[in-house]
Amino acid sequence: MPPSAVYKTNGLQHEFTTDVPRDELTTEGKTTGPSEFVMSKGATDRDKPSEAKDSAMGLLRCQVTRLQDDINEFLTRRMQQEASNKGDGSSKEQEAEELEKQLLDGADED
């Protein structure tokens, strides 16, 4: 049975599964690592994951990466929806995007 997760809040429930074909799984997450913006400025991803081995642990690693991506994307959409429902959607959406960037890229400590 592949890993799964359930998100529940205020009457909303969403299930996440990783029951997808093996060739669609990878260790390179879409929502982890440096953002495209950071990479376009010449950064190097020193923490880039290695390819998964053809083993049970390698498969699990890919499934967990997929699960994390699905959850991150879902929660980002929820944040954007909540922000747009509170009024001025454009500024709230920008704030949500900035928060996402800070969470994914790390906040500057300068």
Image (cartoon, rainbow, N blue to C red):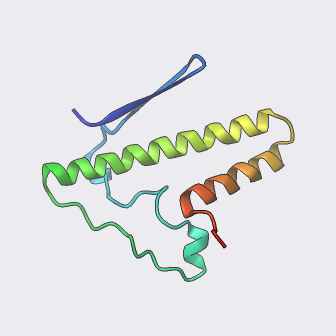
**Residue occupying the far bottom of the picture:** 42
Residue 3 horizontal/vertical position (percent) = 29, 36
Viewed as shown, does residue 29 lie left or right of 49?
A: right
Residue 26 relative to residue 60: left or right: right
Looking at the image, which is closer to me, 91 or 54? Answer: 91
The image quarter containing residue 85 is top right
- The residue lying toward the viewer, choosing from 105 and 107, is 107
- Residue 103 in the image: state x and y as whole percent: 58, 55
Q: Farthest residue to the right: give it.
A: 88
Report the quarter where the C terminus lies.
bottom right
* Residue at image location 66% in from the left, 40% down from the top: 79
Whether 58 is drawn above or below 77: the answer is below
Residue drawn where x is 37% and y is 61% of the image: 28
Where residue 32 sits: x, y (%)? 46, 58
Q: Looking at the rendering, in which quadrant would you find the N terminus? A: top left
Q: Is residue 92 above or below residue 102?
A: above
